[in-house]
Image: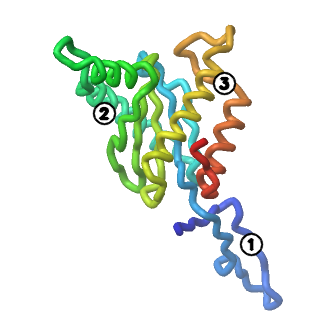
Amino acid sequence: EVFTLRSSQHQDFTGSSGSSYSSLLRVWVKAAMIACITIIAKENNPILLRVFANTSDESKFQYISYCAVDLLEEKERNLPAPTPEMKQEERDRVLGLRRSGMFLGLLYPVEDYKVFGYVMSTGVRLVLIVDENDRQDESMVVAMFKKIQALYTDCASNPFYKAGQPLTYPKLDRDLKDLVRLWNDGRFAAK
């Protein structure tokens, strides 16, 4: 297990001799396993970026997400397209993937993180940045993407939401935090 010091939880106190014991007191918390979730519109602009890691450097995750867009586009271009030569069952499989959303797998490892990608049938892209020590298998990553996709679909179905605009729904934020908490606590279920 990876642990990190959350500086806001560090407390200074003075012992009976008057010396400071602040360097001795440490409050350790388990590091977030999901560091960031990004939703990228079809036009390649991020419409949601939520950082869950213990950091104040959001720009780092913006950069990682922007780099992921290039890899997502490359992987999308390399996906099989249905052709007349394909057997009907193979064509149905390829078309079904494109209609329901596609898990594009591990896009790349970077620094202390692994970056996964998913493309929805609408062209909206999801990026999940997890700690390099996260041991969830890919089926759980796919399940997380499907849950994020469902949350996005709920927001996008709002008649007042205009596609491509930033997602600023408090319920979405709460639901994402709940999903991340379940994942990080090891209680996330694929159901």
Against 128, is 183 above or below?
A: below
Is 147 left or right of 20, judged from the image as shown? left
N-terminal label among 3 and 1 = 1
At a point 83% along the width and 89% down the height, the residue shown is 16
Relative depth, front residue between 107 and 47: 107
Is 27 left or right of 110, judged from the image as shown? right
Helix, strand or loop under label 1: loop
Helix, strand or loop under label 2: helix
- Whether the residues at callouts 3 and 1 have beta carbons within 8 Å, the answer is no
N-terminal label among 3 and 2 = 2
**What type is the residue that disc 3 sits on?**
Thr
The residue at the far right in this view is 16
Please provide percent x and percent y for residue 125.
Answer: 44, 27
Q: To which residue does mark 1 refer?
A: 12
The residue at the far bottom in this view is 17
**What type is the residue that disc 2 sits on?**
Leu
N-terminal label among 2 and 1 = 1
Q: To which residue does mark 2 refer?
A: 71
Relative depth, front residue between 190 and 141: 190
At a point 71% along the width and 63% down the height, the residue shown is 9
> How has the structure been colored for display?
rainbow
In whole angstroms, how far apart are the C-alphas of marks 2 and 1?
Answer: 46 Å
Mark 3 vs mark 2, foreground winner is 2
Considering the image in quadrants, where does the C terminus appear?
A: top right
Q: To which residue does mark 3 refer?
A: 168
